[in-house]
Amino acid sequence: MTKYILKRILYIIPVMFGVIVVVFLMKAATPGDPVLELLPATATEEQKDAMREELGLNDPLPIQFVDYVVGIVTRGDLGTSYKTKQPVMTEILQRLPNTLIVAVLAMALSQVIATPLGILAAVKQNTWIDNLIVFFTMVGASLPTFWLALMLIDLFSVRLHLVPSMYNGTVAGWVLPIIVVSFGAISQTAKGVRTNMLEIIRQDYIRTARAKGQKESIVIFKHGFGNTLIPVIAGIGSGLSGQLGGALIVETVFAIPGVGKYVADAVTARNFPAVQGGVIVLAFICTIISILVDVMYTVADPRLKTNLMAPAKKKKSSKAAAANGGA
């Protein structure tokens, strides 16, 4: 198991290198000159050339890439913001807690709601309760995030005046963003739990528990619930990764000072170091989440741990057989 975890951790290196390459190439292919955004329209060509030299934009692309990678590996340096002249890493770390608050709280809320809904839909299969929950999951998976956010703002902020329409630093300012993010995650997780639970309640050990006269609630929650953890863990992992990747939409709509809005503003201003740094940090966090989810799978279902260890044992037995055959 330790070897598997170490192997997964080592995967971070090629994944992150690929992300850096893609982001850097996209920067090179993006039209526009950031110097034009930084200097006034009255700036002379000499001033523009001096600014390009200061930012290192006159260097050949391979040299820029090597310098960027060396800075990340040796110093954790993601560059300097064109706009604020501050280190990009510092600015991202200041905003990252806001992004994580929305993602973590939304995922916690979604799992608390989605898991019971999925179990209930499976137990009440083909009833009006099941049909209603399935309809809800289809609607939740179909609604665009930005549309849902705007509708909730119109209803709860503009019409009912219950919560602020934009983030204002108070607890109430987190309500709508968390609801918007959790809505899609509830649909996805509930659907996965329902599908998995339908398979579980048809297993022989469930029939045996029922045949022994145990109450249905005990059969479901004691014997069946533990096996629904796989889709729950999958929902948490994909939900967190999806929120981090889609933070740009929610944070822009609700004006949350997080990494997503930071990247969106940087794109508008052609602040390439900020864009690159934001994407790289979010990609790194998503990679870590993926590794943690894989490890949690083995904790929730020990059979997966056996499957992971099986190839190694098979290799050892093959070598031993070859040695015995040679003898």
Image (tube, rainbow, N blue to C red):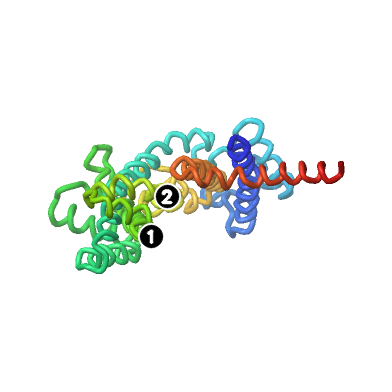
Q: Position of residue 32 (x, y in %)?
A: 58, 57
Q: Residue at x 60, y 51 (%)?
A: 23
Q: Quadrant of the N terminus?
A: top right
Left or right side of 40 for 77: right
Instruction: Classify mark 2: helix, strand or loop.
Output: helix
Q: Position of residue 103 (x, y in %)?
A: 37, 44
Q: Quadrant of the C terminus?
A: top right
Q: Residue at x 32, y 56 (%)?
A: 207
Residue nearest the observer in this picture, 326 or 32: 326
Q: Is residue 99 above or below residue 235?
A: above
Q: CA distance from mark 1 to mark 2?
A: 13 Å
Count up the numbered dots: 2
The answer to whether any part of residue 272 appears in the image is yes
Q: Position of residue 129 (x, y in %)?
A: 20, 64
Q: Dot 1, crowdedness within 10 Å: few (<14), some or many (≥20)?
A: few
Q: Is residue 170 above or below residue 162?
A: above
**Residue most toward the front?**
212
The answer to whether any part of residue 277 appears in the image is no
**Residue most toward the top?**
75
Q: Which residue is mark 2?
A: 230
Residue nearest the observer in this picture, 154 or 265: 154
**Label 2 is placed on what type of residue?**
Ile
**Label 1 is placed on what type of residue?**
Glu
Left or right side of 27 for 194: left
Residue nearest the observer in this picture, 176 or 83: 176
Residue nearest the observer in this picture, 127 or 109: 127
Q: Which residue is mark 1?
A: 199
Q: Dot 2, crowdedness within 10 Å: few (<14), some or many (≥20)?
A: many
Instruction: Classify mark 1: helix, strand or loop.
Output: helix
Q: Position of residue 59 (x, y in %)?
A: 72, 46
Quarter assignment of residue 183: bottom left
